[in-house]
Image (tube, grey):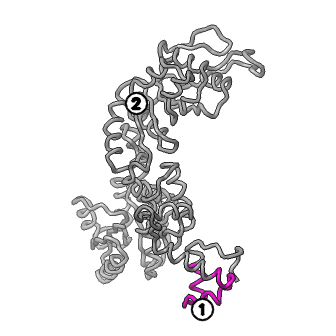
């Protein structure tokens, strides 16, 4: 948290600088409105401005009004020592995040500053997203640091500049739809619709109707004409997820759209012309499906003219801590919290093979955030099956190398089993207090014998 204190009380400024710095903040100070503006003009970029409303060179309320015009993203907490709430309320109407009356408790001030800093961070995240949408950047949802991510970052802008069909291949949960959205956002079509079709979720007839539309009376229940998703996406992008699951009849219709940009409604005779870019994705081996006669070769070659391969997360473990911290940051921005991942938990996350890829990682982190205490994700907050699977690392054929937390977990569980779940006797054998034992049972997610600790 970066704070700029603007107050003419030198003693108070010194106290606040010491106390806020002690809790990890970066603190600067100014004794007047002029000094404040000079610091900002020189490049100072605080998360929060702590502003006294009584300054020696001009009223703080006037400075606030100026800052609202010049720096609308700056969060401000105001201080007043004169008992009247009117000026403080006027400051809040001008956009101040909070106000405090002198004298105040330090804890009260720190809480107000943290709230303002979180609001500032969320505003920056929203601004980054808007900038990515406007300029066609990868966007904040695509995160990584390793060679595979760097290659993707180089490839996507080139593919986006083209208008050709793109096939995205990768296991379930690797982020194929996110890549498709980024392609659309970076393309000249970004102001037009982006339409997602989950091919695996729809029966053949329903999928044909959804894609191409139908005429009244085309089938039982078709009581009126319906426009298809290709028409809805005219000028934009259609993303066909799990293209390997579509039937031969749908494949024929897709090939016609790719070759002529035309199709017919089900039950119709009129040609409908559209201007769409097609992006498809699959987690299946299309080559095998072609060999089995279940996927058209001509459609495959049209789709695969440009392609993106997304490796599974187990092949790019260097991205795991970056992604995990990204999901934590999203949670903190939404809830105004400040959560970390302990080194032991981070090590387990990086060891795990992630069969469900990025999607599984996100779910695990979100679960851990619910269970985490004292602002830190620890090994005990991770699923037991993940801890067990990631606890290896010993030589082949030898016992797995367990973390210290897992050794403690197993020992406490063993002692509880010896005494039939009796907490007092278990605590005595372990040489710790009963209260401490109860806390460790909860933190380490220990299942007592019989499901109960007495």
Residue 428: assigned label? 1
Identify the residue at the far top of this view. 269
* Residue 91 makes an appearance in the image: no
Q: Name the residue rendered at 38%, 52% in the picture.
A: 319
Q: How many numbered badges does the structure rendering display? A: 2
Mark 2 or 1, closer to the camera: 1
Question: Residue under circle 2?
Answer: 307
Q: Name the residue rendered at 40%, 44% in the picture.
A: 139
SS at badge 2: strand
Crowd tier of the residue under label 2, counting other residues whose Cα lies within 10 Å: few below 14, some 14–19, many 20 or above: some
| Percent of width and height locating residue 13 | 31, 78
3 and 68: which is toward the camera: 3
Q: Which residues are magenta?
A: 416-440
Indicate the quadrant containing the C terminus: top left, top right, bottom left or bottom right: bottom right
Above or below, comparing residue 86 to residue 204 in the picture: below
Q: Name the residue rendered at 37%, 59% in the picture.
A: 74
Dots 2 and 1: beta carbons under 8 Å? no
| Percent of width and height locating residue 250 | 59, 21
- Tell me if residue 420 is in the magenta stretch: yes
- In the image, is 201 to the left or to the right of 19? right
Crowd tier of the residue under label 1, counting other residues whose Cα lies within 10 Å: few below 14, some 14–19, many 20 or above: few
Magenta stretch, main secondary structure, is helix
């Amino acid at each position: 948290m970066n704070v700029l204190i603007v107050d003419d009380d030198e003693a108070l400024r010194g106290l606040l600088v010491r106390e806020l710095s002690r809790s990890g903040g970066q603190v600067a100070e100014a004794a007047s409105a002029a000094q404040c503006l000079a610091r900002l003009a020189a490049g100072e970029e605080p998360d929060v401005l702590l502003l006294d409303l009584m300054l020696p060179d001009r009223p703080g309320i006037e400075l606030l009004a100026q800052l609202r015009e010049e720096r609308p993203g700056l969060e401000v907490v105001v201080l007043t020592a004169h008992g009247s709430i009117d000026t403080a309320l006027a400051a809040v109407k001008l956009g101040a995040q909070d106000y405090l009356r002198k004298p105040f408790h330090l804890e009260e001030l720190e809480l107000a500053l943290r709230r303002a800093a979180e609001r500032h961070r969320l505003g920056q995240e929203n601004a980054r997203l808007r900038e990515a949408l406007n300029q066609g950047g990868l966007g904040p949802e695509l995160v990584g640091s390793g060679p595979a991510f760097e290659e993707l970052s180089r490839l996507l802008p080139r593919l986006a500049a083209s208008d050709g069909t793109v096939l995205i291949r990768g296991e379930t949960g690797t982020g194929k739809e996110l890549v498709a959205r980024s392609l659309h956002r970076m393309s000249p079509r970004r102001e037009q619709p982006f339409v997602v079709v989950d091919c695996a979720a729809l029966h053949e007839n329903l999928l044909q109707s959804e894609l191409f539309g139908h005429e009244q009376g085309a089938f039982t229940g078709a009581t009126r004409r319906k426009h298809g998703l290709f028409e809805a996406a005219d000028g934009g992008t259609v993303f066909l997820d799990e293209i390997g699951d579509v039937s031969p009849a749908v494949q024929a219709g897709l090939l016609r759209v790719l070759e002529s940009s035309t199709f017919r409604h089900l039950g119709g005779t009129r040609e409908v012309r559209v201007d769409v870019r097609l992006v498809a994705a699959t987690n299946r081996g299309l080559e095998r499906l072609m060999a089995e006669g279940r996927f058209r070769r001509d459609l495959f070659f049209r789709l695969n003219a440009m392609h993106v391969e997304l490796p599974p997360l187990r092949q790019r473990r260097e991205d795991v801590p970056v992604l995990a911290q990204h999901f934590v940051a999203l949670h903190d921005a939404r809830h105004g919290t400040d959560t970390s991942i302990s080194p032991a938990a981070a090590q387990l996350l990086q060891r795990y093979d992630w069969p469900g890829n990025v999607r599984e990682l996100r779910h695990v982190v979100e679960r851990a955030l619910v269970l985490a205490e004292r602002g830190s994700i620890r090994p005990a907050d991770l699923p037991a099956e993940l801890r067990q699977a990631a606890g290896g690392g010993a030589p082949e054929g030898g016992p797995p190398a367990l973390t210290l937390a897992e050794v403690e977990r197993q020992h406490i569980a063993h002692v509880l089993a010896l005494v039939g779940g009796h907490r007092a006797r278990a605590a005595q054998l372990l040489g710790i207090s009963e209260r401490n034992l109860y806390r460790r049972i909860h933190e380490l997610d220990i299942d007592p014998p019989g499901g109960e600790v007495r």
